[in-house]
Image (cartoon, helix red, strand yellow):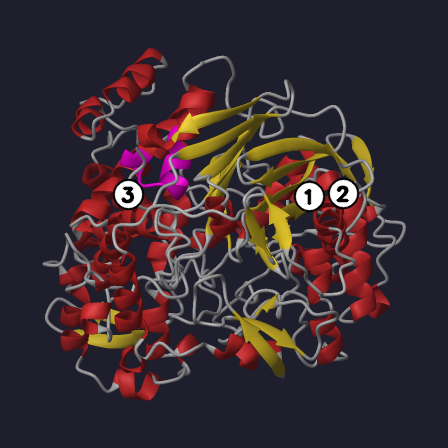
Amino acid sequence: MASAGFTGKILKVDLTSKKIVTIDTAKYEEFGGGYGTAIALFWDICVKPGDWDLQDAYDPRNIITIMNGQVSGAGIPYAGRTSISGLSPQGWPVNWFTRSNIGGDFGTMLKFAGWDGIVVQGRSDKPVYINIINDKVTIEDASKLWGLHTWDTQKEIVKQQTGSSGDGKRDWREIGDNYTLNKPAIICTGQAGENLSRVASLQHGGGAAAGVGGFGGLFGSKKLKAISVIGTGGFKVADPKIILETREWYTAPAAGMGGMGGFGGFGGPQLAKSSCIGCVRGCRSRGQANSEDRDQDGCMETTWADIHKPATKNEHEAKKANPLLQQYGLNGFDTCFGGLEFGPSGDDFPLGTPEASGLGYYIKRLYDAGVIGPGKSVTVNGKKISVDTAPLQWDKYGTYEFAETYVKAISKREGFGGLIADGAVRFAEKIGRIDDLNGILRCPTWGHTDHWSMAEVTWGYGDLVDSRDICDHVLQMVFMMLGMGGSGFGGAKKQQNQDPEAFVMNLTKAFVPYDDDPFMFDYSWDNDQAYKTGIYSEHKAKLVAWRMHYHTYYKESLMFCDWNWAKPTGMGEKGTPFGEPRLYNAVTGKNQTFLEGMEIGRKAWNLKRAIYALQGRHKDNEKFAGYMYKPGASGASFTNTLPVYDGTKWAFENVGKMYLSEKGVETWKTHYYNIEGWDPNSGYPTQKTLEKLGMKDVASILKKNNKLGAA
């Protein structure tokens, strides 16, 4: 029998054999659902057989898992996201096993249909989509959908499944013994994914997207256009009355949990806002620049095509480009032109780049330098390669027209678009400029665009020991109030007037089990203190371990939203570490503690590390790109004003000039491996650690492959 919060079933579809089977969720409950369960499924389905090297994401043996969380669909706020994982086409130089997640209502609808997740393996010989109507699952022909953009794809599937004309009107439909007004929830790939772009996203509904990882390309490689689900059922919870009481307790006005306004300040004038199912935050906006009735992310989508003034010719035109990402299915962050720039980029920042400098920014730098452009070519290893940038028209740079041409060229691999369709790092590699990772190509680890990796360096360290931009805002939400780029943001003046030591001591209380170590929050970096209590110390290693265990369980497995969790300050009993277990226990009827949840995260994180070891991860290749060791590495960030301890007292300081030392990073890695229980010489998990976590069988497979850490 399934535990409260689970339906008890996971769907597995093999597109090669067309075989559809059910997996018992109970076997995987110890991993917490969501991404934790997905890691364990990948281990059992892809690793245990031992019949391939886990290198090529486009190998049909790779799986893609789409999972909901144990509290999904129960009305718990900030818990409506959906986990997506598998070997990542985007990962470089290895297609690391990684994850993305998506908002909207797909995961919840999947649970209402009776499923805790979906596993898709194999490759179809023709375009298909998977159709789920409660417990009825079919593989449908998608030949007429192939080539459509994501909005039209969803409209056509809705029309096929409901008979609706797509005009917004809904009629009651009979499904088995039930009736519904709901449309199917659909995840699909666009033309970028069909053409196997490694920066292709998956799109859902009116603007939700799984961008990082290139999973749109993974759908495309499997000839899978979409997955559609409609559910009319329910699932077991411990006590609905307690859930309602807990929801009312948590969302009471005194909690200070009003909507974020859809980030209207970033996205321009706002017409409306919307939330994931069951949530109250309203962090997705509908702005005047939007075409059709679609949502946009107020953070990334409203800035990806924004060219910094005065270069921009028309800010409104740039905002209009947002729907292109959704329609063609592209990762906005890794293809962006500039992103947000909050700090100076003058003499103290010789790299001269904004905080988010993706593919669009990189090719503009190369064009301005005369490296690429009309009629241009480069010679790599004696071979002449055309870098003619047609169909891009550089005199249109900064306009909607340029953005449209750029997106279409990448998505259809037309002209220059074919050269850049796999992202900035692979483009640099193709044209013999991989050394740009030492300067203008700001991808700190594994081929992903820099995103707040510094000066709040635990984000960067997280990128390093994971497989992607971790996109985890737990500390950014705290520290950005101390000053955006050192210039102040929101309540910065009030925050900076606090006693620094009191601030740090109060913050530390939330970080169980390391709640006795305030030096986790020392950002000393350019002196001996950096090794004693600062960014190269064991204290910073503890903070990264906390961050990765918390993220793996609470955010990626339970599917608590990153825009709200963790809440280490200002929320009292509704914040971390008290709020999360109370919300979880309301659904499950358990008495799970915060620390028990962290241990579930640690177990899943260690299993993922075992996968990485088998893929080729080692201490020797766990290194940052060269620019991270140079002045300017921190670029511009929300979080340059941070706590610093000088050996006697605490202070708030602008550390925006931070860059790393190779010796310091190696020292930090040794501390971190020791805290995780990994071999400090290799970074491999040890038998002792894995057995303590109940994974003796995992240790056996690592040992067989000479990837087990020394005791």
Q: Earlier in the sequence, mark 2 or mark 3?
A: 2
Measured Cα–Cα span from mark 2 to mark 3: 39 Å
Q: Main secondary structure of the magenta part?
A: helix
Q: Which residues are magenta?
A: 29-40
Q: Which mark is residue 326?
A: none
Within-10-Å neighbours for mark 2: few <14, some 14–19, many 20+: many
Which residue, as the protein is rendered here, is positioned at the far right?
A: 375
Tag 1 residue: 427
At label 1, the amino acid type is: Phe
Residue 213: image x %, image y %?
55, 44
Residue 603: image x %, image y %?
26, 36
Q: Secondary structure at mark 3?
A: helix
Measured Cα–Cα span from mark 2 to mark 1: 6 Å
Q: Residue at x 38, y 46 (%)?
A: 235
Q: Secondary structure at mark 1?
A: helix
Tag 2 residue: 419
Tag 3 residue: 601
